Image (spheres, rainbow, N blue to C red):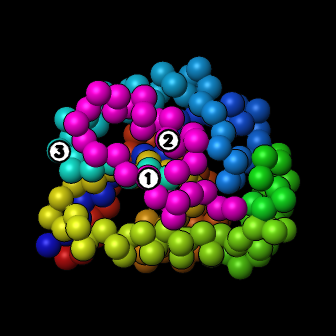
């Protein structure tokens, strides 16, 4: 059997709008982000979801709380779905964060982790899904690192190639875990 996975990013944050890389800081949704979170709920409430998984960082938690307020779908938080830990650069400018990212998947942020580390953390979460959610459809709300983990583990894309592609937002990515 398979697990059907829908991935959505957390909604737009104040940091996104100001050009900062939040990393492991909680972050807060902007006014536009709160409106987009409600639209996410409209899109996904009746999508046959057995559960919603989200990163435990504030911006992802706020996104799912607004999107699924009053819904009967279980919301489960998991720290492994977090963004890459930029360490000393959590909250720094996006340009500053990218200088280290551009060094490759194994380059660690000062007192943080590498993109390779972050992808492997997310992969551990993905590997656990079939034990409880086989044959079901789930939603994951996370970050760029979450999407990289899905693309790496399920689609077999190398982390290095993921780091080199531009991130284009869309209304969800679909994955099938298993055969």
Q: Is residue 28 visible?
A: yes
Q: Which residues are magenta?
A: 56-85
Check disc 3 and report its element: helix, strand or loop.
loop
Mark 3 lies on residue:
48
The answer to which of marks 3 and 1 sits earlier in the sequence is 3
Give coordinates of residue 13: x percent, y percent: 63, 34
Label drawn at residue 77: 1
Q: Quadrant of the C terminus?
A: bottom left
Q: Residue at x 28, y 45 (%)?
A: 74
Look at the image and say whether residue 59 sits in the magenta stretch.
yes
The answer to which of marks 2 and 1 sits earlier in the sequence is 2
Q: Residues within 10 Å of mark 1 (few under 14, many from 20)?
A: some
Give coordinates of residue 61: x percent, y percent: 49, 41
Q: Residue at x 24, y 73 (%)?
A: 131
CA gap, disc 3 to disc 1?
19 Å
Q: Residue at x 22, y 64 (%)?
A: 133
Check disc 1 and report its element: helix, strand or loop.
strand
Give coordinates of residue 128: x percent, y percent: 34, 73
> Is disc 2 in contact with disc 1, using a CB cutoff of under 8 Å?
yes
Q: Residues within 10 Å of mark 2 (few under 14, many from 20)?
A: many
Label drawn at residue 61: 2
């Amino acid at each position: 059997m398979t697990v059907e996975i829908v991935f959505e990013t957390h909604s737009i944050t104040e940091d996104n709008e100001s050009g900062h890389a939040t990393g492991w800081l909680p972050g807060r949704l902007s006014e536009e982000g709160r409106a987009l979170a409600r639209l996410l709920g409209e899109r996904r409430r009746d999508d046959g979801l057995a559960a919603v998984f989200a990163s435990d960082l504030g911006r992802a938690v706020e996104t799912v709380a607004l999107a699924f307020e009053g819904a009967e779908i279980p919301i489960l938080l998991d720290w492994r779905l977090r963004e890459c830990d930029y360490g000393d650069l959590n909250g720094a400018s996006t340009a500053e964060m990218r200088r280290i990212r551009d060094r490759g998947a194994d380059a660690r942020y000062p007192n943080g982790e590498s993109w390779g580390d972050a992808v492997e953390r997310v992969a551990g979460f993905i590997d656990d899904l079939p034990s409880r959610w086989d044959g079901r459809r789930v939603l994951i709300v996370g970050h760029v690192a979450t999407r990289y983990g899905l693309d790496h583990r399920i689609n077999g894309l190398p982390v290095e190639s993921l780091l080199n592609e531009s991130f284009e937002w869309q209304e969800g990515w679909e994955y099938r875990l298993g055969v």
